Image: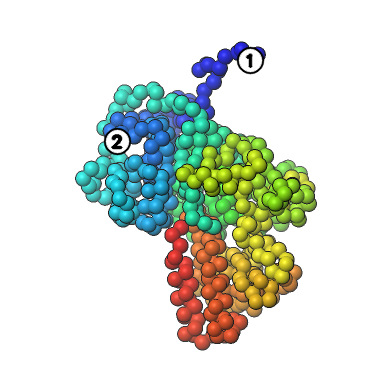
Amino acid sequence: MDVLPKCSANYVPLTPLTFLKRAAFSYADRTSLIYEHLRFTWRQTYHRCSRLAAALTNILNVRKNDVVSVLAPNIPAVYEMHFAVPMARAVLNTINTRLDAHTVSTILRHSGTKILFVDCQFVLLARQALALLNHPIRLVIINDETLALSAPIGAGEVEYEHLISETGFADVDDQIMSVDDEWDPIALNYTSGTTSEPKGVVYSHRGAYLSTLSLILGWEMGSEPVYLWTLPMFHCNGWTFTWGIAARGGTNVCMRNPTAEGIYRNIAVHKVTHMCCAPIIFNILLEEENRIPLTSAVNILTGGAPPPAALLQSIESLGFHVTHAYGLTEATGPALLCEWQSKWNGLSSGDRARLKARQGINVLTVADVDVKDPNNMKSVAHDGTTMGEIMLRGSGIMKGYYKDPKATSDAFKGGWFFTGDVGVIHPDGYVEIKDRSKDVIISGGENISSIELEEVLYKHPRVLEAAVVAMPHPRWGESPCAFIAVKKNPNGFRGDEVTEAEIVSFCKKNVPNFMVPKKVEFLDSLPKTSTGKIQKFQLRALAKALVVTEKSVNKNNLKTQLPQQHYDHSQHQQQQILAQSRL
């Protein structure tokens, strides 16, 4: 059997580019993309992507493995670039639109970006970032005709639609669609920086292809889905659904600014069937007073932060069907899915929500998932209690960190990828996250899971957002400090009836005494990345500042017992610390 040859008839490099070509020929007249009044079919999308790929190669002189970056919201151009850039054999880098100029310039410099596409709304930010570089990068401006938004085109710059129109479809060579090696890079994504400085994560064509298939199978996405883009396309390439919707011949509904009103309106008008989002979006949908009732179930894939069971119950009561996922940028998006089992259907709503809040089992691309003691690499007991580090291995894992061999080596040890997340495995094999390794609170020798304590806080009827971090303690070493944003009263004001004493009393009734927060601080909203992850490194800085302030005034309750001028100073400290983050 070894003499049987591998040839072009029986071996084709795996790449998600084949999804677009298949959609163009199999679903040619089916709507591919909707954005305000714009409509495209899959035939049109294929032609536009092909023209853009040709323009990158023939006009902008982009070559294999060059990095092409884009700074834009969820608009058609970003979707098209997910195919056009790799069709030109280049590497796509989608940049978080909420970064500041310094961080954008750092990413442009580190990635070696050759061409930068920028939405008209972010041209000023792009120009500020480019001014910090010591070498020029050519700009392509994406003007938005649907909203009459445009930016002036400077010398050496070109407008997006003009660039596409300069190249006719007949000029596109078939070899643009070819991939030499499925291990070639297709995308470069920078981590969100919730725990450290962002790193450049490199995806391969093979990994992107297999991860896409894993998710549309694991989520049981049928043909002709109508997918609403509430998740940023810059986040892990939209968890691969930028490519996956083409694979299912579906319709992409783009939104420049996701709002509760806009989400409900698009669901009603376009009969949306699927969407992805972080759990923070659940609160936005729940608090919308003028929401349009759902006429059919909408499937939501959620991840990025563990959703409390109480929040899952609330959102599903509106008609949303939630599937919980766990992933990382390094795993090409979701790596675990809480696949539902029919035997759970008869359980109470609370028990179903509790099971659904678990992170689940590995997607098909991930060959193995385990929870191990990182010191001896032994698997922990499958008892739902013994904690260890979650580890993965499989074809969906990144190639490595760009220009960072040490970080790559540290992440890959003993044939596993170390996620840095602490979790347990239940007897049925389902994984549940307990914390980031850096977020476990060790108080008097006891390990406290901040996620478990947050679950309890979310059960309080007035808690909208909750996060728990370690706070220095003179006796116990560390103690839990809770940061909370409360729900608004019907009159639109937060109200003052929720106090630290009430929250502490509530916790004492639901957790062991050593887990009860020693400090509760109220914020208007918790600091988050653009994908909804709470930035705990900022809250840890706030907690340390609170310790210093309390020592200086010898008080236990900064908000309720200090004179007003001290509380105002504390708010100023909070604002300063929260402003320091660039992500």
Residue at 54% x, 78% y is 548
Q: Residue furthest bottom?
A: 563
Give the colouring mode of the picture.
Answer: rainbow
Looking at the image, is 508 positioned above or below residue 171? below
Give the position of the N terminus as an image quadrant.
top right
Q: Could you give the CA–CA distance between mark 2 and mark 1, rounded to whole angstroms?
A: 45 Å
Tell me if residue 472 can be seen: yes
Residue type highlighted by circle 2: Leu
Q: Are marks 2 and 1 in contact (CB under 8 Å)?
A: no
Question: Label 2 neighbourhood size at 10 Å, few (<14), some (14-19), many (20+)?
Answer: some
Question: Label 1 neighbourhood size at 10 Å, few (<14), some (14-19), many (20+)?
Answer: few
Residue at 67% x, 57% y is 434
Q: Which residue is mark 1?
A: 2
Looking at the image, is 161 positioned above or below residue 548? above
Q: Kindly state the secondary structure of the residue where label 2 is placed.
A: loop
517 horizontally vs 492: left or right:
right
Q: Residue furthest front?
A: 406
Number of marks drawn: 2
The quadrant where residue 305 appears: bottom right
Residue at 45% x, 76% y is 572
55 horizontally vs 350: left or right:
left
Residue 377 location in percent, x, y? Answer: 71, 47
Q: Which label's residue is closer to the chain start, 2 or 1?
A: 1
Residue 153 location in percent, x, y? Answer: 23, 46
Residue 284 location in percent, x, y? Answer: 52, 59
The quadrant where residue 34 appears: top left
The quadrant where residue 393 appears: top right
Q: Kindly state the secondary structure of the residue where label 1 is placed.
A: loop
Residue type highlighted by circle 1: Asp
Q: Residue furthest left?
A: 155
Residue 537 location in percent, x, y? Answer: 54, 63
Q: Which residue is mark 2?
A: 60
